[in-house]
Image (tube, helix red, strand yellow):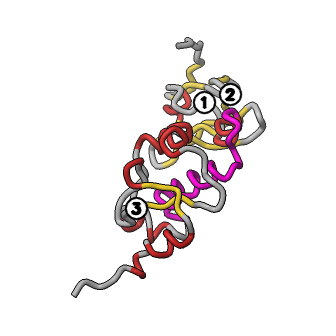
């Protein structure tokens, strides 16, 4: 762990201009009583994140750089993982109500990294899409498969047959 010399300003420490991994701190803001940094990645992308995540190396670069480094960013496999993750975690996603909003989650292992998802699911085969076997279950290795459109269509909540 690197040690830095900090200049105390009032009750806050001055991190502006300091570099942490690929991030350079541009500003310090307090939102809802939490310290956030306005940060810029070496690639030029700007972001805002909790100061403790930057200081503790929880975040090392922007999302784009983190995924470009593995060579999978923008591929069909990465898009499938990213879309599923977004449906489960982002209340602003148009499909959130049918996924995260009704309790469906992505397992911690897959939330942690795309690489874990890739190890568990393999590369997305052409003409198949990510499907939850039990659509009331979570996105996790034992409940997901690469499925055809026909398999997906027969596995929708609306097409479940009523039990008599």
Is 163 displayed left or right of 13 in the figure? left
Instruction: Count neighbours of disc 3 (C-alpha within 10 A) and say few if under 14, some if 14 to 19, many if 20 or more.
Output: some
Q: Secondary structure beneath disc 3? A: loop
Picture coordinates of residue 155, whole percent (x, y): 43, 72
Q: Secondary structure beneath disc 1? A: loop
Give the residue at x 51% y 47%.
31
Residues tagged 1 and 2 counted as in contact (Cβ below 8 A)? yes
Is 116 displayed left or right of 68 in the figure? left
Q: In the rendering, which numbered label is found on residue 133?
A: 3
Instruction: Count neighbours of disc 1 (C-alpha within 10 A) and say few if under 14, some if 14 to 19, many if 20 or more.
Output: some
Q: Nearer the viewer, residue 117 or 68?
A: 117
Q: Nearer the viewer, mark 3 or mark 2?
A: 3
Which stretch is magenta? 69-92
Magenta stretch contains residue 88: yes
Q: Nearer the viewer, mark 1 or mark 3?
A: 3
Measure the C-alpha gap from mark 1 to mark 2: 6 Å
Disc with the residue nearer the chain's start (1 vs 2): 2
Give the residue at x 44% y 71%.
98
Picture coordinates of residue 42, whole percent (x, y): 75, 31
Disc with the residue nearer the chain's start (1 vs 3): 1
Measure the C-alpha gap from mark 3 to mark 2: 39 Å
Q: Nearer the viewer, residue 162 or 34?
A: 162
Magenta stretch contains residue 46: no
Quadrant in which the C terminus appears: bottom left
Residues tagged 3 and 2 counted as in contact (Cβ below 8 A)? no
Picture coordinates of residue 152, whole percent (x, y): 50, 69
Is 126 displayed left or right of 96 in the figure? right
Instruction: Give the labeled residue for mark 2.
Output: 22
Is 39 displayed left or right of 117 in the figure? right
Instruction: Count neighbours of disc 2 (C-alpha within 10 A) and say few if under 14, some if 14 to 19, many if 20 or more.
Output: some
Measure the C-alpha gap from mark 1 to mark 3: 35 Å
Instruction: Give the labeled residue for mark 1.
Output: 60
């Amino acid at each position: 762990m690197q040690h830095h010399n900090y200049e105390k300003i009032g009750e806050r420490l001055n991190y502006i201009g300091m570099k942490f991994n690929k991030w350079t701190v541009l500003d310090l803001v307090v939102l809802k009583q939490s310290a956030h940094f306005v940060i810029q990645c070496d690639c030029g992308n700007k972001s805002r994140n909790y100061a403790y995540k930057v200081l503790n190396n929880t975040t090392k670069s922007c999302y784009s750089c983190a995924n470009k480094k593995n060579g999978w960013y923008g591929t069909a496999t990465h898009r499938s993982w990213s879309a599923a993750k977004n449906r489960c975690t982002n209340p602003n996603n148009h499909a959130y109500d049918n996924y995260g909003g009704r309790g469906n989650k992505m397992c911690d292992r897959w939330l942690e990294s795309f690489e874990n998802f890739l190890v568990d699911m393999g590369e997305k085969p052409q003409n198949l899409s990510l499907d939850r076997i039990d659509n009331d279950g979570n996105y996790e290795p034992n409940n997901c498969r690469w499925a055809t459109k026909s398999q997906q269509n027969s596995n929708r909540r609306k097409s479940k047959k009523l039990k008599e």
